[in-house]
Image: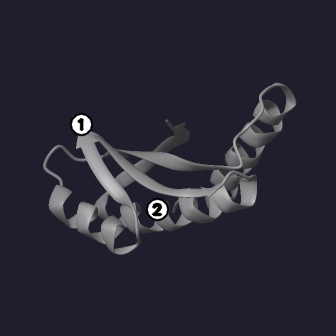
Amino acid sequence: MHDYADQRGDTFKTFEKVGRGVRLPKTAIVAYEFVAEEVDTAWADVHAALRAKGFKTTHRGDVLTAKIGPITIEAETVWHWERIATETALPFEFYPDGWELDE
């Protein structure tokens, strides 16, 4: 079972650390990364599922990137979309591996 509370905590801690010394943009595209658990995975299915939720997706090697936005850059909004992406990707055996602001 995935620990969403722990994942949410990590996102909020990131905002606490970054917010101290870096000025964040008000809005940006956010790229969420997921790692495929299996070598023989259903790439087309996970791409379609995330795109149906509004994400733009790409992958390289075993890493899937799901981008959304521009969205408001605040912890609650980034977490909201992170949870949606995670809930969508997990059934396909893709596991969250962080996020970053896309340039």
| Residue 88 vertical position relative to residue 96 in the rendered view, above or below | below
| Residue 100 vertical position relative to residue 76 in the rendered view, above or below | above
**Mark 1 residue element:** strand
Residue 101 position in % (x across, y down): 56, 40
Furthest residue in direction right, as rendered: 20
Q: Is residue 42 visible?
A: no
Residue 77 position in % (x across, y down): 68, 61
Using residue 103 as the reference point, say whether residue 15 is left or right of it: right
Label count reads 2
Mark 2 residue type? Ala
On residue 85, the disc is 2
**Mark 2 residue element:** helix
Q: Is residue 41 visible?
A: yes
Mark 1 residue type? Arg
Taking depth in this image into account, of 31 and 37 the one nearest to the observer is 31
Q: Which residue is mark 1?
A: 60
| Residue 12 vertical position relative to residue 85 in the rendered view, above or below | above
Residue at (47% x, 46% y) in the render: 31
Q: Residues within 10 Å of mark 2 (few under 14, many from 20)?
A: many
Residue at (77% x, 28% y) in the render: 22
Q: CA distance from mark 2 to mark 1?
A: 18 Å
